Amino acid sequence: MSGKREEILDAAVAIADERGLAGVSMRSVAQAVGVTPMALYPHVGDKAGLLDAMLGRLLGMVFRTAPALADVSDWRDRVRLFAHTARTLAKGHPWVTGLLFSRPAVTPDAVTTVDLLYLALLDAGVPKSHVPRLERLVSTYMLGWIASEAGGRFGSGALDPRGRRGQLPDGALEGHDAVMPWLAQPVDWDAEFDRDLDDLVTMIETLAAKGQE
Amino acid sequence: MSGKREEILDAAVAIADERGLAGVSMRSVAQAVGVTPMALYPHVGDKAGLLDAMLGRLLGMVFRTAPALADVSDWRDRVRLFAHTARTLAKGHPWVTGLLFSRPAVTPDAVTTVDLLYLALLDAGVPKSHVPRLERLVSTYMLGWIASEAGGRFGSGALDPRGRRGQLPDGALEGHDAVMPWLAQPVDWDAEFDRDLDDLVTMIETLAAKGQE
DNA sequence: CTCATGCCTCTACACTGTAGATCTATACGG
DNA sequence: CCGTATAGATCTACAGTGTAGAGGCATGAG
């Protein structure tokens, strides 16, 4: 019966996909559903509720997209698959950026996501007392990456340090000078993301090896 | 001459501090400056320009707040001091959350920030080819943390897993069960942030030890 | 004095979220 | 069949938003 709510969310997500978050107004969503704006309120509460629900829906998609996620035997691969799934999804729906950091992860789907990472960390042998913290560390990084990429913080392609240099405040940029050769060439973001995950996996292993509850 | 721009930004930041980002409208800022809304346009371009400038101003404060940052000898302490400074600042101006991920870091202050981390990583002995990537990893984590904290993703105080459990989708939450004791007690966010930094520092050391360009 | 330049103001427009009151269609008990 | 309760949609209105466009006004130059 409450298919109406789903219909509304579908419409809202569709609008956000093609016109951006700013294009999502009560009026535009209502029109897409074929209804007056005020008719949405019983279903989603208010505008904030609508946005929350949109975020929840996207989180849920992480599973729908990779249903066998929990069955991957190696925890490393599980973390990687999860990360890739989330990243791919966010690239398809860049508007999550604006929503990701707004509310604690309390929807059922979000909790399930967290549990998935808990299990991976436990499988890795991380002391139980460190698991919740490490889950937050890893997911904070992932969220940061996803938001940076979708939101445009990373810029696009080569970074052109000389361009940056133009409006230099004052004093030299020693660090930039030292790594200039690697700044000059364009960045392969897919590869970089994988390498980051490798480093995080290594970090997890280190913590597991150190042991002690 | 362009003290008017500074005056406008001061007013905008002040409003954001006390009334939130939503309270920053062209009209409210204009009124605070004692001018009509349209008078702002020559100075800041448009609303987006105003917001960008506000973000830039806050980034600049990182240095003003910890001027001796570059002189800390141990790179570990430098990373930690930087992180703490940024976190403290963001907690005082929680509205940055909405802005942090919107634009690439190209303002002079932002570039200087990046350079600071480059130098720390070089001091740590990280292979030069890895420095830019690792800088992004570390700052992505920091931004993610800051945004999570200021934006409310972490919730407040204890997490109360039983509360989360209430609207459980279906199937058990094995991971949550396993770490329940540590979920039950409240989180010391200051301590957690420090521990995270420790882990990141360790990760950097591992990468430095592995060596090879 | 005349004129130009740069900053400001005023008005207006199309849009936003949503409170409040009203209307309507469906389902149910008799 | 009727009358009524209930849940949902609707209409109107309000206070707020960003900003295009045209006009005003005070300063300094020739």
Image: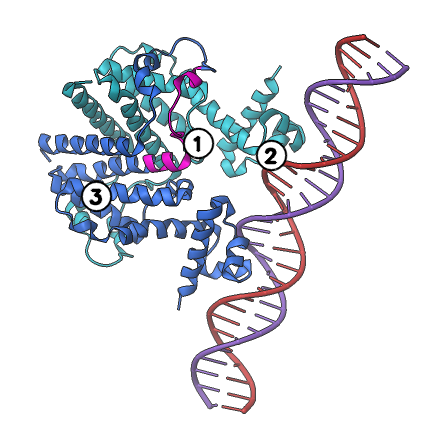
Chain colours: A blue, B cyan, C purple, D red
Residue range in magenta is: A145-165
Q: Which residue is mark 3?
A: A117
Using the image, name the chain to which the residue with label 1 belongs. Answer: B
Which of the marked residues, 2 or 1, is nearer the chain's N terminus? 2
| SS for callout 3 | helix
- Mark number, residue B26: 2
Q: CA distance from mark 2 to mark 1?
A: 18 Å
**What kind of residue is marked 2?**
Met
In magenta segment, residue A185:
no
Do the residues at pointers 3 and 1 share their chain? no
The amino acid sitting under disc 3 is Leu
Query: In the structure shown, which secondary structural element does the residue marked by tag 1 occupy?
Result: helix
Q: Which residue is mark 1?
A: B96
> Residue at the location (51% across, 26% down)?
B53
Is residue A168 in view?
yes
- Of marks 3 and 1, the one in the foreground: 3
Q: Residue furthest front?
A: A185
Residue A36's disc is: none
Please, which chain is the residue tagged with disc 3 on? A
